Image (cartoon, rainbow, N blue to C red):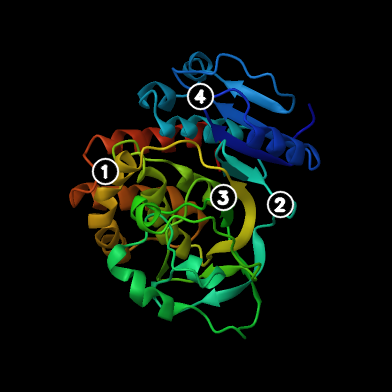
């Protein structure tokens, strides 16, 4: 196989879903390669050309320390897929889930994007930029929902180029919202095809792991924490990543929908229970991160990641055992992708 122009990473316990099959077809058009991260529950094989399965046994046989420390039957095993792609010098990584199918407008992106800028330091409900429907992304502080719409840029704002090593594409159909929204406002949603929105320094909005582009300068920030609830691991990661991206002088950018989600079955009460720590702490976590003095530049990214976790452990958002995993992640990264 020639060197892929991009990698995609998915974790699943299912055989190939229609969404994954469609993703592989789209990747094939662009010399892309899909890494499937399995778990104890499966799958044991994955007969889908253009994809590669990492079973739990294969993960544990890799020359890495992190796979043996990560919990099993857990979404954070996706970290192993990131490490494998990074170790192969992936030019960029598109991560998604097995129930998100690329739409016709899905295409590989570049790390520099022309976007409208959200500038005023505050919370910005990106969903409200792409639709007039009352909706907010999973992980958005409930206490900020009303005020956040005032931080949206004017409709006539000018598109400007900006380096953006993390870019989130929205999902039509069943977008990534919290359990409260699903209980009281369930609906099929279609967002507008507006220009991209880039969040500058001090502007906060959670992003997920269901349709996200990453480039090498941000690879250390892909780490998914283990010692929080399943519904918060990618959300709390997103807050840490945003804080660190500011020190690169870059932005996190959100795009109009490029995937369509037909959501796998979920127990909404269980989702709600898993989201309670976020409802109570999302704003506090970002407040803690905002006060940190981090170093500027690409070489400081691993150190800044560590500083963020140290602060969040000290404040009690994570238990101290999370630090061993973060340090091991960074050690594995340094081993497979030294500067």
Q: Mark 1 highlights which residue? A: 273
Q: Disc 3 vs disc 1: which is toward the camera? A: 1
Q: CA distance from mark 3 to mark 4?
A: 21 Å
Provide the secondary structure element on which disc 4 rests: loop
Which badge, 1 or 2, is on the more N-terminal residue?
A: 2
Q: CA distance from mark 4 to mark 1?
A: 23 Å
Q: Give the tally of numbered discs.
A: 4
Q: CA distance from mark 3 to mark 1?
A: 25 Å
Label 2: few (<14), some (14–19) or many (≥20) C-alpha neighbours in 10 Å: some
Which badge, 4 or 1, is on the more N-terminal residue?
A: 4
Q: Are marks 2 and 3 in contact (CB under 8 Å)?
A: no
Q: Are marks 3 and 1 in contact (CB under 8 Å)?
A: no
Q: Mark 2 highlights which residue? A: 106
Label 4: few (<14), some (14–19) or many (≥20) C-alpha neighbours in 10 Å: some
Q: Is residue 303 visible?
A: no
Which badge, 2 or 3, is on the more N-terminal residue?
A: 2
Q: Mark 4 highlights which residue? A: 13
- Identify the residue at horizontal 53%, vertical 65% (top origin): 250
The quadrant in which residue 110 appears is bottom right
Provide the secondary structure element on which disc 2 rests: loop
Q: Disc 4 vs disc 1: which is toward the camera? A: 1
* In this rendering, position of residue 219 left or right of residue 180: right
Q: Mark 3 highlights which residue? A: 212
Q: Disc 1 vs disc 2: which is toward the camera? A: 1
């Amino acid at each position: 196989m020639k060197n892929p122009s991009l990698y995609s990473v998915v974790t699943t316990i299912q055989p190939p879903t229609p969404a994954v099959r469609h993703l592989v077809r789209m990747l094939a058009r662009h010399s892309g390669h899909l890494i499937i991260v399995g778990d104890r529950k499966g799958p044991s094989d994955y007969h889908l050309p253009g994809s590669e399965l990492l079973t739990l046994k294969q993960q544990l046989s890799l020359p890495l320390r992190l796979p043996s420390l990560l919990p099993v039957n857990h979404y954070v095993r996706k970290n192993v897929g990131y490490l494998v792609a990074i170790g192969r010098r992936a030019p960029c990584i598109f991560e998604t889930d097995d129930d998100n199918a690329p739409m016709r407008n899905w295409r590989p992106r570049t790390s520099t994007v022309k976007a409208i800028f959200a500038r005023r330091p505050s919370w910005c409900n990106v969903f409200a930029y792409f639709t007039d429907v009352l909706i907010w992304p999973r992980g958005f502080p409930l206490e900020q929902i009303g005020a956040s719409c005032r931080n949206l840029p004017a409709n006539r704002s000018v598109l400007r180029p900006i380096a953006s090593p993390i870019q989130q594409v929205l999902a039509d159909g069943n977008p990534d919202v919290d359990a409260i929204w699903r209980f009281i406002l369930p609906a099929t949603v279609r967002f507008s095809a507006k220009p991209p929105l880039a969040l500058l320094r001090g502007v906060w909005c959670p992003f997920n792991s269901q349709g996200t582009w990453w480039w090498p300068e941000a690879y250390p920030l892909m780490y998914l924490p283990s010692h929080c609830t399943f519904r918060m691991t990618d959300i709390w990661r997103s807050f840490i990543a945003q804080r660190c991206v500011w020190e690169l002088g870059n932005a996190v950018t959100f795009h109009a929908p490029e995937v369509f989600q037909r959501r796998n079955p979920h127990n909404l009460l269980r989702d709600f229970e898993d989201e309670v720590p976020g409802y109570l702490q999302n704003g506090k976590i970002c407040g803690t991160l905002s006060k940190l003095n981090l170093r500027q530049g690409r070489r400081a990214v691993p150190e800044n990641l560590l500083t963020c976790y140290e602060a969040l452990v000290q404040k009690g958002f994570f238990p101290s055992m999370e630090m061993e995993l973060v340090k091991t992640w960074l050690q594995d990264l340094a081993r497979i992708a030294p500067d």
